[in-house]
Amino acid sequence: MKTFNIALIPGDGIGPEVVAEGVKILKAIEEIDANISFSFTEFPWGCEYYLEHGKMMADDGIDKLKNFDAIYLGAVGYPGVPDHISLWDLLLQIRKQFDQYVNIRPITLLNDSLTPLKNRTGEDIDFLVIRENSEGEYAGAGDWLFKGKPEEVVLQTGVFSRKGTERIIRYAYEEASNSNRTLTSISKGNALNYSMVFWDEVFEEVGKEYPEVETYSYLVDAASLYFVTDPMRFEVVVTSNLFGDILTDIGAAITGGMGLATGANVNPEKEFPSMFEPVHGSAPDIAGKGIANPIAAIWSVSQMLDFFGEEKWGEIVLSTIKDLLKETEHLTPDLGGSFSTAEVGDRFVEKLRTYT
Ligand code: NAI
Ligand code: MG
């Protein structure tokens, strides 16, 4: 019997609503499969915690999390607490302290009816974006000079270390090589004459170790266009933190929107726990109504199971999502259905049981 210890950070808004459904699915798997068990420990961190304690998480929060096999996070951020505080003091702390330098975002159309693109099917839209998750423009380097004065200047520095750039690019080559797919690097060497010229050089250098991988290199503006007009050309994509953030929202848009998009924050060496979360935020506009779509959070569960080496279950969860998406009436309102968040989770568990 394998036991996986999972730290839960449901967070704010719809975070707790969707995490509850993910946990429901894990508990169902545990019941069905006698060889797996999960233990859950919940942490009450987020904006409410901030309003009470003046901080987003406990002082020894990172220490408390470090021995878990994975962190399952809902969403953080809520009106009343500035977004840069909620993001930096919780989510980015975890990503940084645990060196979760790989962000894995599948851009896969699970049901043809969900894309706004004309005449595109699941065969056309099926790729993986590997986003650098530890530095770039999100390194927090910069300055704010002469605040409030006419000569005010702000600097936000992109940080691209050799170590950080090489390891994400190597991770992407490994992924492409192991799955026999092409690799596309997305950068902007024409305008960003230090960071992206360097990125392109490293992409070529590391590529020499992987002669079997067919590669492409696009500027980010052209790539944004291709995401919409010609998504077929992508199989595995590697890009920087900022570009990856923006491009994967386009990816979400062409595959059914925020209620479906998922992302894993991975420390490949498993020196620290990795974190699994839906891409969406706390959605204050629908929080508390019980109508948040839990599928993105459930897809995160599938990514988590893959990461645990339980690929069989990861695949079953993904197939069950595909199955569920065929029944519009059994989905939440954002996908045209009339089910509540919890009803979608219940229906999911019913379907899951039919696989066994
Ligand atoms: P958001 O993703 O929370 O919402 C954007 C739109 O998508 C809203 O109309 C919302 O109702 C809808 N939506 C999102 N998830 C949905 C779901 N599961 N089912 C149905 N509809 C869904 O982004 P927004 O409004 O920009 O941010 C709200 C708060 O969340 C902010 O405080 C922001 O900082 C935070 N945030 C946190 C993230 C995280 O924890 N990883 C990521 C993005 C935003
Ligand atoms: Mg984003």
Image: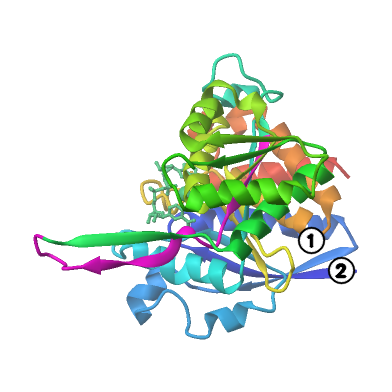
Percent of width and height locating residue 110 = 67, 31
Most foreground residue, 113 or 253: 253
Asked which secondary structure carries label 2, the reply is: strand
- Mark nearest the camera among 2 and 1 is 1
The residue type indicated by label 1 comes to Phe
Tell me where the magenta segment starts and ends, as one range.
Answer: 127-150
Q: Are marks 2 and 1 in contact (CB under 8 Å)?
A: yes
| Looking at the image, residue 119 lies above or below residue 198 | above
Quick check: 179 left or right of 65?
A: right
Counting residues from the start of the chain, the first of labels 2 and 1 encountered is 2
Most foreground residue, 68 or 250: 250
Instruction: Tell me the residue that label 2 is attached to.
Output: 2
Q: Is 138 a magenta residue?
A: yes
Percent of width and height locating residue 325 = 65, 31
Occupied quadrant, residue 87: bottom left
What colour scheme was applied to this rendering of the protein?
Answer: rainbow
Instruction: Tell me the residue that label 1 is attached to.
Output: 308
Q: Is 40 a magenta residue?
A: no
Percent of width and height locating residue 170 = 71, 54
